[in-house]
């Protein structure tokens, strides 16, 4: 992964540990917002990613590239692939049960991804320092151990629920997010 210092954990970063109330190993994570472009079941044209955590530390999801995701003829658009990486990384910070947002996302495109390909996405956290989480993800073609097509590294920053309430419906947000630790 080509990575900048911004997405590389500093030496003093803590090793990540899932929140005691996080989804246990082997369980599904669910959507963080029903109308999210990445994971919302109610989004009409979204990616509809459904993540599981096999071990309580990483998250996995599958994304099948469709005709609506093309950039070049019959090849996935890079921005759509970046959105999928952003989402799977966003799902992995779910394990901390605190709200985070993407501050920086770096993406390496390693292989073209044809329409019809199922990408096996996986994300994990490399370290936490204060409000900053340093995360990584990959998308592999056809199988969990298939060839890597996309890699990403990200800096996510923890925010409070006010961040979302400023622009969205606070009651609706609260209704979907009774699981977050909002006053850590
Ligand atoms: C209801 C649904 C719930 C669940 C919601 C889950 C959503 C997940 C969805 C998928 C993920 C997304 O797409 S999220 C959507 C895309 N992202 C966004 O809209 C975020 C827009 N940006 C922002 O709102 C802001 O810039 C923040 C929150 C990232 C940071 O602002 P802030 O809170 O004022 O904090 P600030 O002091 O600036 O930054 C804190 C520390 O991070 C560093 N930092 C901040 N940004 C960067 C950066 N780009 N590159 C390097 N470093 C950075 C600062 O230098 C500082 O380091 P130091 O001085 O402390 O060392």
Image (cartoon, helix red, strand yellow):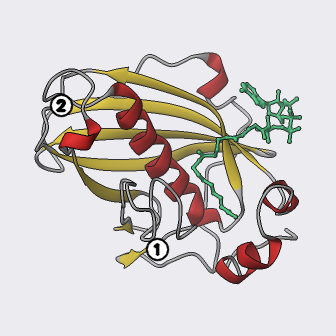
Quadrant of the drawing holding the N terminus: top left
Image position of 38 (left or right of 165):
left
Q: Position of residue 58 (x, y in %)?
A: 42, 57
Describe the element under mark 1 as helix, strand or loop.
Answer: loop
Q: Position of residue 2 (x, y in %)?
A: 44, 16
Neighbour class for label 2 at 10 Å: few (<14), some, many (≥20)?
many
The residue under label 2 is 113
Relative side of 104 to 76, left or right: right
Mark 1 lies on residue: 30
Q: Is residue 165 above or below residue 173?
A: above
The residue at the point 36 percent across, 61 percent down is 48
Q: For marks 2 and 1, give the CA distance.
A: 26 Å
Q: Earlier in the sequence, mark 2 or mark 1?
A: 1
Instruction: From the viewer's perspective, tell me whether residue 114 is left or right of residue 70.
Output: left
Above or below for 183 versus 135: below
- Quadrant of the rendering where the C terminus is positioned: bottom right
Image: 22 above or below 168: below
Q: Which quadrant of the picture is home to ligand 1?
A: top right
Residue at the (31%, 28%) spot, across then down: 77
């Amino acid at each position: 992964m080509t990575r900048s210092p911004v997405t590389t954990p500093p030496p003093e970063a803590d090793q990540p540990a899932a929140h005691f109330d996080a989804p246990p190993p082997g369980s599904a994570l669910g959507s963080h917002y029903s109308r999210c472009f990445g994971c919302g079941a109610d989004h009409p044209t979204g990616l509809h990613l459904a993540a599981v955590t096999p071990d309580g530390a990483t998250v996995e999801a599958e994304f099948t590239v469709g005709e609506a995701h093309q950039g070049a003829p019959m090849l996935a658009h890079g921005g759509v692939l970046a959105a999928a990486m952003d989402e799977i990384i966003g799902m992995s910070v779910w394990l901390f049960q605190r709200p985070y947002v993407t501050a920086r996302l770096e993406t390496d495109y390693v292989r073209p991804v044809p329409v019809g390909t199922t990408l096996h996405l996986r994300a994990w956290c490399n370290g936490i320092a204060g409000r900053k989480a340093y995360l990584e993800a990959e998308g592999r073609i056809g199988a969990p151990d298939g060839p890597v097509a996309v890699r990403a590294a990200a800096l996510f920053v923890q925010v409070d629920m006010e961040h979302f309430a400023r622009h969205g419906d606070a009651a609706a947000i609260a209704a979907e997010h009774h699981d977050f630790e909002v006053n850590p």
